[in-house]
Amino acid sequence: MIESSLTRDIAGRVIAFEVFNHGESHVCAAVSMLVINTVNSIEALTDAEFSCKYDKKNTGYITFELESPRSISPGTEAGLLLDAMVLGLEATAQKHPTELTMKEK
């Protein structure tokens, strides 16, 4: 089962996430696409500073954290991209509850 964990700031905005326990199902592919596209989009389309670590052995482990709280101020591109990722993950978890869990720290 894929596990994901979100960290929100005091205002409820996503500031970090972690995804692990990937497999090879279509749900794993969907989650990978959502997460990788979000990280790549934040890097290419915003000036947000962040740290991102992943397992190079293709286990699906990835962790992401914004370096600056102003990166997710209301209306910023990074915040919008993270919100879009969360919507996609929530929809996937609702359709496939035995394959993806989401929790918040």
Image (spheres, rainbow, N blue to C red):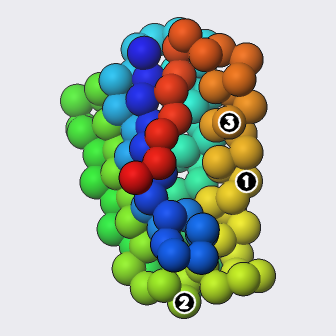
Sequence order check: which comes first, mark 1 or mark 2? 2
Q: Secondary structure at mark 3?
A: helix
Residue 69 lies, in percent from the top left, at 48, 84
Q: Residue at x 35, y 32 (%)?
A: 20
Neighbours of disc 2 within 10 Å: few (<14), some (14-19), many (20+): few
Q: Secondary structure at mark 1?
A: helix
Q: Is residue 52 above or below residue 66?
A: above
Rounded to the nearest whole Å, what is the CA distance between mark 3 and mark 2?
Answer: 25 Å
Q: Which residue is mark 2?
A: 70
Q: Give residue 105's mark.
A: none
Residue 21 lies, in percent from the top left, at 34, 23
Q: Are marks 1 and 2 in contact (CB under 8 Å)?
A: no
Rounded to the nearest whole Å, what is the CA distance between mark 3 and mark 1?
Answer: 10 Å
Q: Which residue is mark 1?
A: 84
Q: Residue at x 65, y 14 (%)?
A: 96
**Which mark's residue is nearer the viewer, 3 or 1?**
3
Q: Which residue is mark 3?
A: 90
Q: Is residue 11 above or below residue 7?
A: below
- Of residue 64 and residue 103, the one placed in the foreground of this image is 103
Amino acid type for the residue under numbered disc 1: Ala
Amino acid type for the residue under numbered disc 2: Arg
Q: Secondary structure at mark 2?
A: helix
Q: Is residue 41 above or below residue 37?
A: below
Q: Which quadrant of the view contains residue 16?
A: bottom left
